[in-house]
Image (spheres, coloured by chain):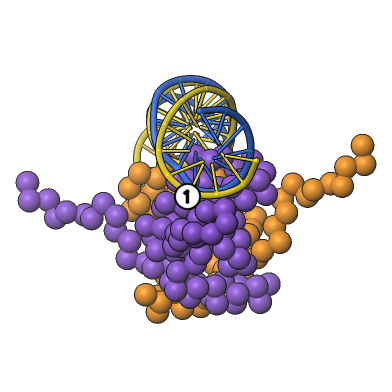
Chain colours: A orange, B purple, C yellow, D blue
Amino acid sequence: MTTHEIPEDAEICPAQALLKMLSGKWKAEIFRLATERPLRFSTFLRSVEGASKQSLSTALREMENDELIQKTVIREKPLHIEYTLTSKGQQLVSVFRQLEGLS
Amino acid sequence: MTTHEIPEDAEICPAQALLKMLSGKWKAEIFRLATERPLRFSTFLRSVEGASKQSLSTALREMENDELIQKTVIREKPLHIEYTLTSKGQQLVSVFRQLEGLS
DNA sequence: GTGAGTAGTCATAAAATTCTGACTTATTGC
DNA sequence: GCAATAAGTCAGAATTTTATGACTACTCAC
């Protein structure tokens, strides 16, 4: 059968793709916090009630793959990791800010 | 205990609220189709593979409550119902269009 | 080398979301 | 009245997402 392969992930609409990248219980919050300051794994868990290590870990990895955030190892007093917005992520911020004007 | 009531739905960020309104398996697609032409219940079910009556019904009701779409009874040849974007919904379209410019 | 802090992974359990299929109500054509 | 179309609702099943709790690995201070 030379089925006319319907692409499994037929994302024609960029906005739709973006919504998918930020869907899930914690991704929007992760993104928002990362706009304010570098995000750390344990800090997020402590401050955001209800979130689990597992979900956070998965969300961070997916957002990294989607190039919304990036991971940096900080070799300092307490060695740790920081997640910050990529330039792609930063670009979204200005679009989101416009939303705050609307009704 | 006069707990300093942490509002259960502390949606301070409008962008976050919007993402929530468009989260779920079919809402983005519903929204996108509604930007193109009035949306009908059975047409959606026929054209979008995998969607169930139940989910569609729920999604439409929620989006109506969120004032993204509105429901109109069309008293014509085959009496039917049309879902169209509200002005609030329309406003979002221009914001989404900007997304298409980004990487 | 022991203990504390940071950042995870893994298997399993619980919870939330979505689908299935039967049934309902209203309108229209014959 | 009878069948067809449109737009649903409802209970229960299946699927997907998220949470739990135990455990690992690395670094640093003592």
View extreme (right): residue: A2
Q: Which residue is mark 1?
A: B59
SS at badge 1? helix
Residue displayed at 65% across by 65% down? A14
Q: Assign the N terminus of chain A to one quadrant of the image.
A: top right
Res A90 visible: no
- Residue B73 horizontal/vertical position (percent): 46, 58
- Near-viewer residue (B74 or A62): B74
Query: In the figure, residue A16 lies in which quadrant?
Result: bottom right
Residue displayed at 29% across by 55% down? B9
- Near-viewer residue (D29 or A37): A37
Q: Is residue A35 above or below residue B45?
A: below
Label 1 packing within 10 angstroms: few (<14), some (14-19), many (20+): many
View extreme (left): residue: B1
- Near-viewer residue (B76 or B65): B76
Q: Amino acid at mark 1?
A: Ala
- Residue A22 horizontal/vertical position (percent): 53, 57
Residue displayed at 16% across by 54% down? B5
Q: Is residue B4 above or below residue D8?
A: below
- Residue A87 horizontal/vertical position (percent): 60, 73
Q: Is residue C1 above or below residue B38?
A: above
Res B64 visible: yes
Q: How many marks?
A: 1
- Residue C19 horizontal/vertical position (percent): 58, 34
**Which chain does the numbered disc 1 sit on?**
B
Residue displayed at 65% across by 73% down? B100
Q: Assign the C terminus of chain A to one quadrant of the image.
A: bottom left
- Near-viewer residue (B13 or B76): B76
